[in-house]
Amino acid sequence: MIKVENLHKTFGKDVKALNGLSFTANDGEITGILGPNGAGKTTCLRTLYGLLKADSGVATIDGISAVDNPIAARAQLGIFPDKFGLYERLTAYEQIDYFASIHGLSGSHKKQAIEEVLADLEMEDLAHRKTQGFSQGQRMKVTLAQALVHKPKNFVLDEPTRGLDVMSTRILRDYLARFKAQGHCILFSSHVMQEVAALCDRVVIVANGKLAAQGTPEELCQLAGESQLEEAFVKLIGSDEGVAA
């Protein structure tokens, strides 16, 4: 479970990126974060990663504070960034091995974990190839394997399908559905309304650094009096009044 409570973060004197943001992402659910550019989505996710420290408020991963104990909290997360940055002189196996070591895996336990994630993602044929020249879909698989190798309970994804072709997007969605069925907590940001409507159990709408509304896609449509999530989103970010259950 990922829980954000009253997060505040200001950059400089005037830029208030987070202004009391609060929400919960539950185990066994996919929770989507929607918001216009500059709403605070990435700042929130980077606070969960431990890359940024909030000015005040609490963010916890399975009860561990990402503010007070960022390393322990990070160990509970699988992080899938918005860019698939790879060390292109390394093979896929070597890259996954590197991330496994960062998370404290070693020896036969590390080797077994790497082999399992390679098998789970059906990427044994890619394992010993250098990642230079990999397609976006192949790069996505390596990045996903890096996030999964330490078997985290929680996954955080920042616009995971950006730049992917249709088939790679379908593969990633299938994996997310599988992880959800296994009881994982999945939190991701996206600008693709159809994707959010199709995948998410709950949606958190952020505007001006705070919660504008939350609920299932259907609840948000009902709250806004619209039949489509995109139209509901546009209406809801225009006002911070009212929060769905």
Image (spheres, rainbow, N blue to C red):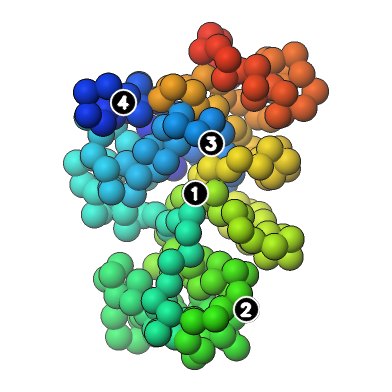
What amino acid type should be assigned to the residue bearing mark 2? Glu
* Rendered residue at 28%/48% (across/down): 50
What amino acid type should be assigned to the residue bearing mark 4? Val
Image-quadrant location for residue 121? bottom right
Badge 1: few (under 14), some or many (20 or more) residues near its Cα, within 10 Å? many
Indicate which disc, 4 or 2, sits on the residue closer to the N terminus: 4
Q: Position of residue 51 (x, y in %)?
A: 28, 48
Badge 2: few (under 14), some or many (20 or more) residues near its Cα, within 10 Å? few
- Secondary structure under tag 1 reads strand
* Rendered residue at 76%/18% (across/down): 226
Given contact means CB atoms under 8 Å apart, are the residues at marks 2 and 1 in contact? no
Q: Is residue 82 visible?
A: yes
- Secondary structure under tag 3 reads strand
Indicate which disc, 4 or 1, sits on the residue closer to the N terminus: 4
- Give the residue furthest to the right: 227
Q: Nearer the viewer, mark 3 or mark 2?
A: 3
* Rendered residue at 32%/24% (across/down): 16
Residue wearing tag 3: 33
- Give the residue furthest to the left: 68
Residue wearing tag 4: 15
Badge 3: few (under 14), some or many (20 or more) residues near its Cα, within 10 Å? many
